[in-house]
Amino acid sequence: MNAIDLRKVTGTARLQALRIVLIGPPGAGKGTQASVLRERYGLAHISTGDMLREEVRRETALGLQARSLMAAGQLVPDTLILDMMSQRLQQPDVARGFLLDGFPRSRAQGQALVATLGQLKQPLHAVIQLDLEDEEIVRRLSLRRSCPSCGRVYHLQTNPPTLHGLCDSDGAALQHREDDNEQTIRTRLSVFHQQTRPVIEFFRSLGLLRTLDASLPIEHVQHLVERHLRAAMVRNSPLSTSRRFAVTRYRSLGKVSR
């Protein structure tokens, strides 16, 4: 299946700054899909996991507080995440649109995000949920490797690097993250099911959620993600909004029968 060509989308929709959330359990492929969307749409890729790991690397106050929680597979408290995200959303590159990866992870975070974007008059276009069974996630993450330099993620079976153990982008030696062991993975999954399911239902109640089968081939999932985004872009374009308003107004005046 071919990826959606932006030239096929209306000119009005192309001018929009896309605002997207990718949500799903660890290992469902959020990082892989985010990398493609970031390059294709010029979005700011905001990964709370990457941001937290950078804080840990720099040994900041937040990083020191988060390190033990992350190593045990526990979620970092909402207050710390929201403070970090609030600062990130004010940076200039976000004006072109953004892709949130790993945030929000609780209903409180989701509500805070929607409220903040509402105040800025920059609502979300879509929330894409990548759904995958737990046992497949354990298998995937045990074989996952990542580049410590650029953050690119590989899988030794389904998405291996060209040269064994080296990143295709910068040649850095790939690493097996310390939290990608079976015990920690299962703890993370338990936390995900307990804490993150409510935010999924929250976005569903807003009509923003689209759920995709993440067990499909990477290219197939990519096609489905872009199909949903294309529909969201057209649905939320100013032209589309104006047309819906006009139709609603004409109906109220009795000029449109159906």
Image: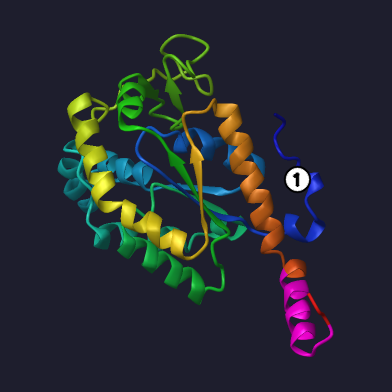
For the question of whether residue 42 can be seen, the reply is no
Q: Quadrant of residue 88?
A: bottom left
* Residue placed furthest toward the top: 164
51 relative to 205, above or below: above
Query: Residue at image x 39%, y 17%?
Result: 173
Query: Residue at image x 84%, y 85%?
Result: 255
Q: Decide which of 168, 125 is in the foreground and name it.
A: 125
Q: Residues within 10 Å of mark 1 (few under 14, many from 20)?
A: some
Side of 212 where 79 appears, left or right: left
Residue matched to label 1: 6
The amino acid on which the numbered mark 1 sits, given as a three-letter code, is Leu
Range of residues picked out in magenta: 241-255
* Residue placed furthest toward the bottom: 253
Q: Decide which of 49, 213 is in the foreground and name it.
A: 213
Please provide percent x and percent y for residue 120: 52, 73
Disc 1 is placed on an element classified as: helix
